[in-house]
Image (cartoon, grey):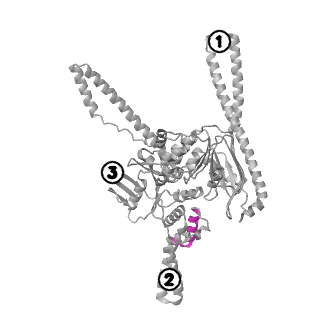
Amino acid sequence: MILACNSISKSFGTDQILSNVTFHINEREKAAIVGINGAGKSTLLKIIMGQLSADQGDVTLAKGATIGYLPQHQDLSTENTIYDELLEVKQNIIDLDKKIRQLEIDMKNVEGAELERMLSTYTRLTHEFEIQNGYAYQSEITGVLKGLGFTEEDFKKKTSTLSGGQKTRVALGKLLLTAPDVILLDEPTNHLDLESIAWLETYLTNYNGAVIIVAHDRYFLDRVVTKIVEVDHSKATVFQGNYTAYATKKAMLREAELKQYLNQQREIKHQEEVITKLKSFNREKSIKRAESREKMLNKIERVEKPITHEANMHLQLEPNVTSGNDVLTVENLSKSFGNHQLFCGLDFDIKREEKVAIIGKNGTGKTTILKIINQIIAADQGDVKLGSKVNIGYYDQEHHILHPEKTLFEELQDAYPNLDNTRIRNVLAAFLFTNDDVFKRVKELSGGERGRVSLAKLMLSEANFLILDEPTNHLDIVSKEILENAISNYTGTVLYVSHDRYFINKTATRILDLTNNQMLNYIGNYDYYLEKKEEVEKAYMKPVETVTTATAVNTNSSTNTSSGALDWKQQKEEQAKLRKKQNELKKIEEEITTLETRTEEIDELLTKEEIYTNVSELVKLNKEKEEAEARLEELMERWEELSE
């Protein structure tokens, strides 16, 4: 055991945040702290770090163990470059290297006993240098920076000029290079793209120390952690396994607790009814029996009603009008900002009821594509065509669609003037805004609260084509699951950008990977994308061409476009074939079900006297059954072929 929390309690005013929280972490163990927003997860990390004092309880760290912490928000304002900022972590190795180099110089000018002494020191220092990985520390820094999504051009940028997300990545890099015995990470994946998250997963899984993570990224937790500490209504419960194992066990426990509570409530109600009935007889013996039952009832240890999250969002998305089959067609789309080209010659289309995720590294232009489709910014070239009766509902990750000076009530009232006050209040209540909360101004809200207001507006829009930019940002796990269910059950069409792989895996029917200025198509969810990524990139990825100006893009566009068009045509042909096979498979399954149902009906009819005594009817039914079974055999063979 390297870290233990013993009976930690913490209140802010009258709000009890943590109550008798107890758990321990073993050496090299990877654990997650989960719970809804406001449950006290970050508070618990700060108490472990000694940044907040607990009202009662204590934190025990193994003797000599070191601990490091990455909070959600960073304030790096030095004039160091990104590389130099991480180099500071290796200052002891740099100093050691200087001592070794100085000794090498000094030894040239001494002899005898002094030389022997210096040689002994030199041997000791070089051994220490080797143990601390001194010969590879620069490669280690470069590897961590690249893993976290920085390019070599970024290394020279000053940290004071970076965005909040970039500063968080620099701080994470410093922490990983420090390599403490225990690492505490508060939402480490918030500012990472998919490749960087995958790199961090591997790094932490192989990390030689213990790791405690607070995160809403369930895919990340599934791959990294082996223990879950759930903070729920100020109490902590420990579950062994990853996030999926925890969610399964939690659901089973909740169901068992609820069942036990309801069974006891039924028994109590039954006994109370019997007691009332006995007393109503108004006889001495019946009254004594009633009193005896009352005593027994009072001695029962009452099962507390299981606590559930009554304050869940109520999100139901449903289009008002059904769109045409062709929802969106994008042809030869290109966009540059100055000399920086984001993408060139992109082609893709989206059909009704598809749930399409756009993925790719940070800065490749995913959000830009959504903004072009929504006519927020203009493309340099290319066509964007919406299909018949398509009505867009847009969710912007920066929530620019919300007016900062308006109250929540005004935001909905102005957007939907036909709604009465009661309906507006009910909708806001469904997204956890009640009483005077509805009169808060948008600018006063947290990121998560703004996200809920945007979702409320989206629900009211009754759009049939939802375009969502990072819809799960700032949502807790419970809210993410509610959004997943709403998207999965939505009968319209969805196009979204997300870094949440669990969300993508649950909701996407198709993935468009924006990489190397190209759009690669995968007909499946995130797991399918991972399975086919190498194969698809080998088949369709064009060689990288360096483009420095918008003019160069236009000059070479004919070659690129023809090659891209050929790739896209091949992909579309393959998609069409696959869709055709999927449709055939569906029809075969339906016909199999119909024929099996009919053969069962015939078997039942053949047992009836009025049938088996009627020769002509008997022959007719037997012939129908034989034909049905022969057809079933054909269908089964074809089904197996298509399933392969």
Nearer mark to the viewer, of 2 and 1: 1
User: Which residue position holds label 2?
Assistant: 119
> In the image, what residue occupies the spot 76% across and 48% down?
569
Name the residue: 27% across, 33% down.
Answer: 298
Label 2 with label 3: CB-CB less than 8 Å: no
Closer to the camera in the image, 554 or 73: 554
Label 1 crowd (10 A; few <14 / some 14-19 / many >=20):
some
Mark 2–mark 3 distance (CA, rounded to whole Å): 66 Å
Measured from the top left, where is residue 46 in percent x and y?
Answer: 40, 59
**How far is the residue under mark 3 from the one under mark 1?**
80 Å
| Image x and y of residue 596, in percent | 64, 25
Depth check, front residue: 524 or 157: 157
Residue 371 in the image, given as x and y percentages of width and height: 63, 53
Give, as a single range, the part of the protein colored magenta. Answer: 130-147
Q: Label 1 amino acid? A: Tyr
Q: Which residue is mark 1?
A: 612
Mark whose residue sits in front, 3 or 1 = 3
Question: Does residue 262 appear left or right of residue 356 in this picture?
Answer: left
**Element type where label 1 sits in the image:** helix
Q: Earlier in the sequence, mark 2 or mark 3?
A: 3
Q: Earlier in the sequence, mark 3 or mark 1?
A: 3
User: Looking at the image, is mark 2 or mark 1 earlier in the sequence?
Assistant: 2
Q: Secondary structure at mark 2?
A: helix
Nearer to me, 374 or 627? 374
Disc assigned to residue 14: 3
Above or below, 238 against 607 in this view is below
User: Is label 3 in a helix, a strand or a loop?
Assistant: loop
Q: Give the camera-side residue of 8 and 495.
A: 495
